Image (cartoon, rainbow, N blue to C red):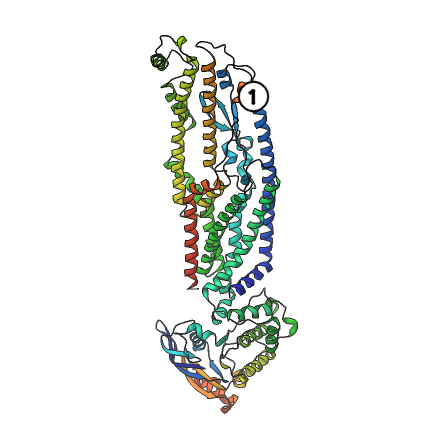
């Protein structure tokens, strides 16, 4: 579903992403770990087609992102760190609009079903987004992905700033999407959440993918140790 | 996608308290302005009807009198207030409402509304045209300045892009959401004006097609403003900057450009002062025949020419009263002098208008204003037209009176009195303003400029949508 081949992005003399090669298959959740500036968000922006690569290529559902920017959008959904919706519109209205933009026309009852599936409480459906917490907004974001029937989900620090309960609920939602065959690429700082939800984990530093793991094959302490070693935080390594 | 965006934008606008208040204020101002204008229109035309009837009564009931005395006694040509002046009062306030028609002299229109007001009139009046031309463009800015910038600032643009939004469809949705409230407000006001005019006494000729044309001109003006505001919003990163740039455009378009145009036009093609104009007319008049002076060189030449033409030795032998004949010839000379000097004024006015049209390239306000005034019959062209019609009537009146004097009396018979019924034989002054087709044909360049603005602003906007 998601493939990058030597994907590279340079800004002047700085290399933000350096020959990234990864693959996320149907029903997989790939978590990219790394400090700020590691190249996680650049990877997502390249996959979204928001910025052109300096070299290499990226594919979504076998379509080259650069050549088929518009076409690839129909397969993917994106949830940024701070999902911003229209504050004066209700959750239903936001979902209706964003799914409409993606070419999906759903009835009000269908929209409600999707919101419910995304874990939003029914009382909140008709409330304006301006009254929503970040966790509730992220659920609307998931609802947008569900309504779109996205095959690929790109998440940029989606659990950042969420309380543990909301973060846990978000993790459960990702598992639900995984069971539907959605390929998810999630950039995060959260090792615990990554270990909990991911099928695969990659650690990035200075634009390079330094290590990759199958999530089930590594324990949380091992993952933490690998992360700290990669980051060269030697004094923190237990 | 267009309808989804349109509905979303409309909901957002309606839920924004500032927008609701602004729309209510503009609608209230327009309602009050239309009501005031309707009252004013009715009052002025009632006065017009009264004055016209009274003046004709005075003319008809002069009794037995020498026709030339009647020529000096004179009468008035009154200019009615036309129905669409309810929407645009144009230059009516400054142009004068009546012209005194007398022998030997072409008078200016007098009794302008502005002359009857105090210095406070400089603050201006609350008229529909003020709101339509100045306030509604401001409302467009208020509604649309953050149309695109808010998406950047709120962060929704990223999500929209990831949904695969189509730039031009998104833009058209936003355009429609901005256009519809402006269309609604303007349509309500024009409909109200139409209903009011339809129910008022028909002093002028009210035609729905003229009102519709006026509406279309204003809609074109607003569409240009909508396009400009959306264009600015799509090219700027912050709402504050978009607002400032849009307001600068409004200031240049609606305030600075018309005033600059006026100054440039006046400097390039100045009107003579009133004193210069009067002195030039007097000089030319003196160089020709004065009907009142039988001893002048010109009068003697005319005398010789007429005697030769009729083959007689004395003016007494002529089959008409030479005094009346000379009066008419003097009148014809003076009419020519006035024609020449007023034509010069008209030429200067035409040149000034060309300067305005040239500057319309930087301001869609200018062609809109000219078209609006022309369709409402409140522009200078209509005033010139009225003044020319009054002058034509004055010349015809003088001929009617001089001919009566020449035919019905003999040379030197200044004691001649025309019958009391004579005056009724003179047809009353009637003036019909130019029809809509004539107006549009006269203003084809203004229509063209407005059309170019419309197409260019749409073209730029659609071109920009590719890079949003």
Can residue B68 be seen?
Answer: yes
Q: Is residue A238 visible?
A: no
Q: Which residue is mark 1?
A: B60
In the rendered image, which quarter contains the C terminus of chain B? bottom left
Q: Pointer 1 indicates a residue of which chain? A: B
**Residue B215 drawn above or below residue A155:** above
Q: Where in the figure is residue A173, as x and y percent of width and height?
A: 57, 80
Q: Position of residue B334 (x, y in %)?
A: 40, 22
- The foreground one among A57 and B369 is B369
Give residue B49's position: percent from left, percent from top.
58, 30
Q: Quadrant of residue B56?
A: top right
Q: Position of residue A169 (x, y in %)?
A: 59, 80
Q: Residues within 10 Å of mark 1 (few under 14, many from 20)?
A: some
Looking at the picture, does residue B449 appear above or below residue A44?
A: above
- Is residue B171 shown above or below B185? below
What element does badge 1 sit on? helix
Foreground residue among A71 and B432: B432
Q: Front-most of B261 and A21?
A: B261
How many numbered marks does the figure carry? Answer: 1
The answer to which image quadrant residue A108 occupies is bottom right
* Extreme residue toward the bottom, this view: A217
Q: Is residue B185 above or below residue B312?
A: below
- B454 on left or right of B419: left
Relative side of B47 to A238, left or right: right
């Amino acid at each position: 579903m998601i493939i990058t081949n030597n994907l590279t992005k340079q800004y002047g003399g700085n290399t933000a992403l350096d020959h990234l090669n990864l693959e996320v298959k149907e029903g997989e959740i790939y978590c990219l770990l790394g400090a700020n500036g590691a190249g996680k968000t650049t990877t997502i922006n390249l996959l979204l087609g928001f910025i052109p690569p300096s070299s290499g290529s990226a594919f979504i559902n076998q379509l080259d992102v650069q050549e088929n920017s518009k076409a690839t959008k129909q397969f993917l959904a994106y949830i940024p760190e701070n999902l911003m919706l229209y504050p004066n519109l209700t959750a239903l209205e936001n979902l209706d609009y964003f799914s409409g933009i993606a070419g999906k026309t759903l009835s009000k009852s269908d929209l409600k079903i999707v919101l419910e599936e995304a874990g939003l409480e029914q009382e909140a459906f008709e409330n304006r987004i301006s009254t929503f917490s970040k966790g509730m907004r992220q659920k609307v974001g998931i609802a947008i992905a569900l309504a779109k029937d996205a095959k690929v989900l790109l998440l940029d620090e989606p659990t950042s700033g969420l309380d543990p309960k909301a973060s846990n609920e978000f993790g459960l939602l990702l598992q639900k999407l995984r069971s539907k065959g959605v390929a998810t690429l999630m950039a995060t700082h959260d090792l615990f959440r990554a270990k909990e939800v991911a099928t695969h984990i990659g650690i990035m530093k200075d634009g390079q993918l330094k290590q990759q793991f199958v999530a089930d094959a590594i324990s949380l302490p091992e993952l933490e140790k690998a992360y700290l070693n990669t980051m060269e935080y030697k004094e923190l390594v237990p | 996608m267009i309808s989804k965006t349109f509905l979303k934008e409309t909901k957002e606008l309606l839920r924004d308290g500032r927008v609701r208040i602004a729309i209510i204020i503009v609608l209230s101002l327009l309602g009050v302005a239309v009501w005031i204008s309707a009252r004013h229109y009715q009052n002025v035309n009632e006065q017009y009807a009264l004055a016209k009837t009274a003046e004709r009564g005075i003319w008809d009931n002069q009794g037995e009198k020498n026709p030339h005395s009647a020529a000096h006694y004179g009468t008035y040509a009154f200019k009615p207030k036309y129905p669409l002046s309810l929407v645009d009062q144009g230059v009516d306030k400054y142009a004068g409402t009546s012209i005194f028609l007398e022998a030997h002299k072409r008078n200016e229109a007098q009794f302008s509304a502005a002359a009857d007001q105090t210095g406070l009139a400089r603050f201006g009046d609350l008229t529909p045209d003020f709101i339509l031309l100045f306030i509604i463009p401001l409302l467009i800015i208020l509604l649309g300045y953050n149309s695109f910038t808010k998406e950047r600032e709120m962060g929704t643009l990223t999500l929209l892009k990831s949904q695969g939004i189509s730039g031009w469809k998104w833009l058209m949705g936003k355009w429609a959401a901005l256009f519809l409230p402006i269309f609604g407000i303007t349509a309500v006001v024009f409909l109200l004006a139409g209903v009011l005019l339809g129910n008022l006494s028909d002093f002028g000729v009210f035609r729905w097609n003229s009102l519709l044309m006026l509406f279309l001109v204003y809609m074109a003006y607003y569409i240009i403003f909508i396009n400009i505001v959306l264009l600015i919003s799509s090219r700027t990163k912050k709402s504050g900057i978009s607002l400032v740039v849009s307001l600068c455009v409004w200031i240049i378009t609606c305030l600075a450009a018309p005033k600059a145009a006026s100054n440039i036009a006046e400097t390039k093609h100045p009107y003579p002062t009133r004193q210069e104009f009067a002195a030039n007319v007097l000089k030319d008049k003196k160089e020709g025949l004065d009907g009142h002076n039988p001893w002048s060189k010109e009068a003697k030449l005319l005398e010789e020419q007429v005697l030769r033409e009729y083959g007689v030795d004395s003016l007494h032998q002529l089959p008409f009263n030479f005094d009346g004949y000379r009066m008419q010839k003097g009148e014809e000379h003076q009419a020519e002098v006035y024609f020449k000097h007023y034509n010069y004024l008209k030429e200067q006015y035409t040149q000034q208008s060309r300067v305005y049209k040239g500057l319309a390239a930087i301001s869609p306000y200018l062609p809109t204003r000219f078209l609006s005034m022309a369709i409402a019959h409140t522009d200078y062209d209509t005033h010139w037209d009225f003044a020319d019609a009054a002058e034509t009537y004055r010349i015809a009146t003088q001929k009617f009176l001089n001919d009566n004097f020449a035919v019905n009396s003999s040379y030197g018979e200044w004691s001649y009195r025309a019958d009391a019924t004579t005056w009724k034989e003179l047809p009353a002054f009637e003036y019909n303003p130019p029809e809509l087709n004539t107006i549009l044909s006269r203003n084809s360049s203004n229509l063209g400029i407005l059309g170019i603005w419309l197409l260019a602003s749409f073209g730029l906007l659609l071109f920009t949508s590719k890079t949003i």
